[in-house]
Each structure stands twice: as structure tokens, then as C-alpha cells.
Amino acid sequence: MARAEDGRPTSSVDMFVTCSQAIADGVLIKRVSQQDKEFHFQNWVGSRLDDASLNHDSSGRNSYPDFTLVNFPEGYEVKGLAVPGREASYDSNSRVPSGLHNGRTVFYVFGRYPAKIDEESYPVIDLVVCHGDFLNADHEYVHKNRSFRGFGSYGDILVRDRKMYVAPTPFALTEGTTGKQTLIVPADYTVNDPRLDVVGELTRVEADSIAVGYSFDLTTNSLEPRTIENPTAKVKHSFIAYRRSGIGQGAVTLRVKPILEVPGDDEGEGDS
């Protein structure tokens, strides 16, 4: 049994191996309807948790993470990405990625699948299961929506500050994950499992400065961030990349320059 840095057992290896085996066995994503544009891959992941005998609760479509385990203080957040399409970043509505939430370790499951196909069943092209700290190592920030009233000619319109975070995916951060299945966990995890091979050692370094606020001018529509020196600048966070044994190697490395998409400012917005 693999164990986290604090000695607690972790489900991540069993979960990853089960997903990887399912892809090798040709287990397809099944779309319930043409209107099912978001949750088909989430359902596929839920079935893999069942296959791995990992009892879980589905938190609901607007909850975080998507699945919380019963016997482990862990959860899984699922991100499906259509190919071709936007795959280097994803929108996180009112939720900053993190490896810890409400005392639970959070893993992210990124899976890519074909876009614009007519069939109701289709394959998982590639997959990354990663510890949330690989995306963001901060555990302190707590998101809160805020609002004020006073906008508009009569002063009775409410302005909501409802933040959308756009984070890079592991496919944007790494080389060697395309077309394969990869598990990324902190280097201090104890993973001595014959089902896995080490395929990479990845180190992310904290930035020199961090954003701590911003201001928005309603008359000019200008957005100005406020930054400070990062008190933990240059701190290194090390991770190990694994692949299932016997399905080929190929190193996983960090990109020298991550692919950082810049979605349009109005992308994803609506009137709801």
C-alpha cells in the first residue's frame, strides 16, 4: 500500500492503475445524451473508483471535489478535455486548485477524449492523475464571493465579485504525457509498487512575487493586480511521475516554458 508523507495510506496508486488498465482494455466513455457535454468523463472516473473498490460519495455537480472517498481522507476532482480544443488550461469556477480541502487530500484526474464525434461511446486518449499540489501548493487561501450595491443610474444594482480562476493543466506543464497515462505524486510519498515504474522527477519552484489583490475600474474596465514579494519564493516542490509497468517508458519532464493559454476575457460568460 502506497503511503502519503504523513504515513497515511493513499488510494491514488490503486485509482491510477485501475484507470490505466481500463484504457488499455478499451473501456469507453459513454455519453448519456448529446446534451451531456461535461459529465460523461466524470461518470467514467466514478466507475473506475467502483472498479478499484474505493467507496465514495458524489458531492454533486457544483461541489468540490467531485468525489470524496469514504475510507480515505482523499477526494478526486475530474477535468475532461476535448481534443482538438482547449486543453492547456481549464476554468475553475470559484475554486483555486489545491492539494488540500477540508482536511482531505485532493487529486485531479485529467482525461482527454475526441471532440466533435457522433458516436455515443469514445475512448480516453490520455490521462494524468496528479496531486493538487502539483497545480498549486498553497493551502491557506480560502475563496469567498463578495458583492456591493450602488451601481447603475438608480444606485440599486448589485455587483458581484465572483472570481473565475484559469489554471494550466498537466499537459501544459509537462512533456511526455501526451498519448499516455501518468501518475504524479509528491516525492515524499512512499510508492513501492511493482505495478508502477518511475518515469520522471519534477520540481516546481515558487514564484518571486504573488498576487494578493486587484482593483477594477468600472468606468474604464481596467483590471490592475496588486502583488507582493512571495515569502516562500524559490521554495521547491518535488514530485515523481509514474507509469504502469510493462506499457513502455518515455520520460516525463517539466516544460521549460509551460503552455499558458489566455482565454478571451468574455469566454464562458453568460447571462445566468
Image (tube, rainbow, N blue to C red):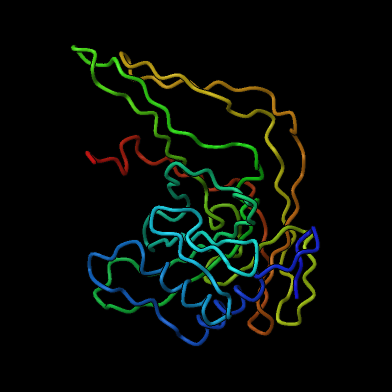
Q: Nearer the viewer, residue 6 or 231?
A: 6
- At 27% from the left and 78% from the top, the residue drawn is 119
- At 65% from the left and 22% from the top, the residue drawn is 228
Q: Quadrant of residue 3?
A: bottom right
Q: Position of residue 192 (x, y in %)?
A: 80, 75
Quadrant for the N terminus in the image: bottom right
Image position of 173 (left or right of 221): right
Image position of 272 (left or right of 248): left
In the rendered view, would you say 185 is above or below 245? above
Q: Position of residue 105 (x, y in %)?
A: 64, 56
Q: Position of residue 138 (x, y in %)?
A: 65, 41
Quadrant for the C terminus in the image: top left
In the rendered view, would you say 230 is above or below 58? above
In the rendered view, would you say 12 is above or below 222? below
Image position of 17 (left or right of 214): right
Q: Position of residue 32 (x, y in %)?
A: 28, 74
- At 52% from the left and 48% from the top, the residue drawn is 168
- At 34% from the left and 38% from the top, the residue drawn is 264
